[in-house]
Image (cartoon, helix red, strand yellow):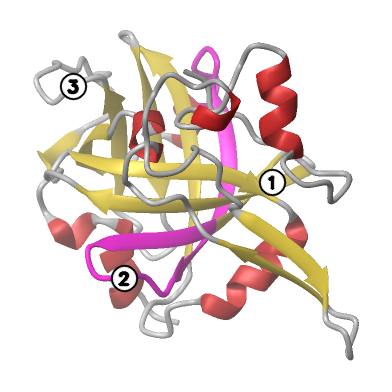
Amino acid sequence: LSKVQVTLLTGRSHQIRVQFASRGFPLVGDGKYGSRIKAPAPALWSWQISFPHPITGKDYTFCAPPPALFPFSLFSAPPETEHKYLIRYPDVDWLCRQDGARVREMLQTYLAAAPGETRRIRAVREGEKTAFFYTRKVRQTALSAAEEERQISAAEYETLLAERDATRNDIRKTRYSFPYGGHVMEVDIYPFWQDRAILEVEVRGEEETVLLPRLLRVIREVSADKRYKNVNLAKEIPA
């Protein structure tokens, strides 16, 4: 199975279904055009629509993720699983000297969300370039969450800012990342802490062990401590 993003250039009826079927790749659940998988509807979803306001001319973008139901559930990404550690404030020069090191400035804004999920947008600056991302998470366990993330345009980022959660402040942080011991170390430094930072390490499963660099001085693991999740820090930091 493959998940494909299609940008339409015309408004012809059934064009996505017909074009894929004609090449031997019918949409999952689309029995009319050759799929052998039975489903209530084809796995076809319009996740974004953009148009100018008819009076003001301002561009609007609206997004909706596909439901977590069959057949869309067949394309769900594996859960994001990570360990999170509270560490002593690190030597930034040492972080920058690591092989493969990256430094990114992040501005993170939380959006209004349904109970049990979090939604956020990020502006990420690396060097002279800035990219924008939308993320939706549904927590499964203390270590893992179902995550949907995609890069978005600057215009969509500005549109989504209107959906910000008024009870949470923006999070600013600098992320230093580098490979180590078969994993990627991600050290987040926040302007409101002068003596500590957060280390995150994504793993393939909750039982996987992690080797940490000795020069990153761990205070304790906080994977299960909700106080150290960014969505909750956003409630505590000053505006």
Q: Report x, y in % for residue 49.
A: 70, 61
Which corner quadrant of the image does residue 150 belong to? top right
Residue in the image at 52% along x and 12% along y: 99
Quarter of the image where one finds residue 81: top left
The label nearer to you, 2 versus 1, is: 2
Q: Are marks 2 and 1 in contact (CB under 8 Å)?
A: no
Amino acid bearing label 2: Ala
Q: Are marks 3 and 2 in contact (CB under 8 Å)?
A: no
- Judging depth in this view, the residue of 101 and 109 nearest the camera is 109
Q: As drawn, is 86 to the left or to the right of 190?
A: left
The amino acid at mark 3 is Gly
Q: Is residue 7 left or right of residue 213?
A: right
The count of marks equals: 3
Badge 3 marks a residue whose secondary structure is loop
Q: Which mark is residue 114?
A: 2
Q: Residue 80's x, y, as percent?
A: 30, 34
Gap in angstroms between the C-alphas marked 3 and 2: 27 Å
